Image (tube, rainbow, N blue to C red):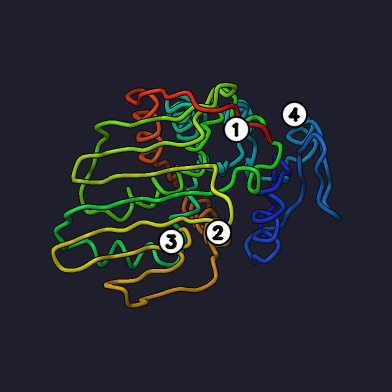
């Protein structure tokens, strides 16, 4: 088993990363770094530099911090010869992630920009079914309640927090994976609460008749759905890609095991001495923030 350090012990780390590491035969959770969060039975640090200094036996670092501070931690880990796994979105900017990729290559360590929704059970078979199809249109409907998934986390509405594109990047990671052709943004309406620096909702139009509706104000049932129309039938992905239907008939569906799959993939990358850096979802986020029309809406409060 390989020793790994988890940095940033918040909701996503507790809900997904810790159980996935503990259930894996590849990994031993040997340390954590967090200002306040800890994991029972695991050595806890509040200072990342101290962890790097005192635990040279830990060869892999998984970063679950918000995007803005992530670059600094990743750069330090790479400089110390550690392999690095980045929670999505992998950084606050495209340029900094490209810089990290260059650093990792020079240092001979693995860098993995994870996109957990691509690991949903229906994504790979959806990609395979669409590979030889003529696409006539597609629509993304990605709507959830920010209060449920990011309770009190003001950073999501601060510069670099990406707002609704934090969950929206999950949808973008799926659509860029399953479509057999590239798309690019034509227009977008971005809804900014009057007291926030990032959008709470977005409506987008891409080439190839692809549209998207992201909203962080959804109450009640949450919806993470993608529909792709083809000349040979309609494909639907529901539950964030966990459930696949073709022409209304269930093809696959089951429990979501995205994070265990990510850690299995990280083990493969480290073993083979390779990196996996894909920024295509972030390109669409950057395009939306560049091209989108800003529309001011009512203030938002947790």
| Whole-number angstrom distance, CA of label 3 to CA of label 4 | 38 Å
Q: Do the residues under discs 1 and 4 have CB atoms within 8 angstroms?
A: no
Residue 109, image x, y percentages: 52, 40
Q: Quadrant of the N terminus?
A: bottom right
* Element class at badge 3: helix
Disc number at residue 241?
3
**Residue at 46% from the left image edge and 65% from the top image edge:** 242
Residue 205, image x, y percentages: 27, 38
| Whole-number angstrom distance, CA of label 2 to CA of label 1 | 22 Å
Of labels 3 and 1, earlier in sequence is 1
| Whole-number angstrom distance, CA of label 1 to CA of label 4 | 26 Å
Which one is closest to the eye, mark 4 or mark 2? 2
- Look at the picture and state if 227 lies above or below 74: below
Residue 134, image x, y percentages: 14, 58
Viewer-proximal residue among 287 and 27: 287
Q: Which residue is mark 2?
A: 221
Of labels 1 and 4, earlier in sequence is 4
| Whole-number angstrom distance, CA of label 3 to CA of label 1 | 23 Å
Q: Which residue is mark 1?
A: 156
Viewer-proximal residue among 138 and 298: 298
Q: Do the residues under discs 2 and 1 have CB atoms within 8 angstroms?
A: no
**Residue at 42% from the left image edge and 49% from the top image edge:** 171
Give the class, few, some or many, for how many residues have Cα within 10 Å of label 4's Cα (few <14, many ≥20).
Answer: some
- Look at the picture and state if 143 lies above or below 7: below
* Element class at badge 1: helix
Of labels 2 and 1, earlier in sequence is 1
| Whole-number angstrom distance, CA of label 3 to CA of label 2 | 16 Å
Of labels 4 and 2, earlier in sequence is 4
**In-image side of 39 versus 20 (left or right):** right
Q: Which residue is mark 4?
A: 49
């Amino acid at each position: 088993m390989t020793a790994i350090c988890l940095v940033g012990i918040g909701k996503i780390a507790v809900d997904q990363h810790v159980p996935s590491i503990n259930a894996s035969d590849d990994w031993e959770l040997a340390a954590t770094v967090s200002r306040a969060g800890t994991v029972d039975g695991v050595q806890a640090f509040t200072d990342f530099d101290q962890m790097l200094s005192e635990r040279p036996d830990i060869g892999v670092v998984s970063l679950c911090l918000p995007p803005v501070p992530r670059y600094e931690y990743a750069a330090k880990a790479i400089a110390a010869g550690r392999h690095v796994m980045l929670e999505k979105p992998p950084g606050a900017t495209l340029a900094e992630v490209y810089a990290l990729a260059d650093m990792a290559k020079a240092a001979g360590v693995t860098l993995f920009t994870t996109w957990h929704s691509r690991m949903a059970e229906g994504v790979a078979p959806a990609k395979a079914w669409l590979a030889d199809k003529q696409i006539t249109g597609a629509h993304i409907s990605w709507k959830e309640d920010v209060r449920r998934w990011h309770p009190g986390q003001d950073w999501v509405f601060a510069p670099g927090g990406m707002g609704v594109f934090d969950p929206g990047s999950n949808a973008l990671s799926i659509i860029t994976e399953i479509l057999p052709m590239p798309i690019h943004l034509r227009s977008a309406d971005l809804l900014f609460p009057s007291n926030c620096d990032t959008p709470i909702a977005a409506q987008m139009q891409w080439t190839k008749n692809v549209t998207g509706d992201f909203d962080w104000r959804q109450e009640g049932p949450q919806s993470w759905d993608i529909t792709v129309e083809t000349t040979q039938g309609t494909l639907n992905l529901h539950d964030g890609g966990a459930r696949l239907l073709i022409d209304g008939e269930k093809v696959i569906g089951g429990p979501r095991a995205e994070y265990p799959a990510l850690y299995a993939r990280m083990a493969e990358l480290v073993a083979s001495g390779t990196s996996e850096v894909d920024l295509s979802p972030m390109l669409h986020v950057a395009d939306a923030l560049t091209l989108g029309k800003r529309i001011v809406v009512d203030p938002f409060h947790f």
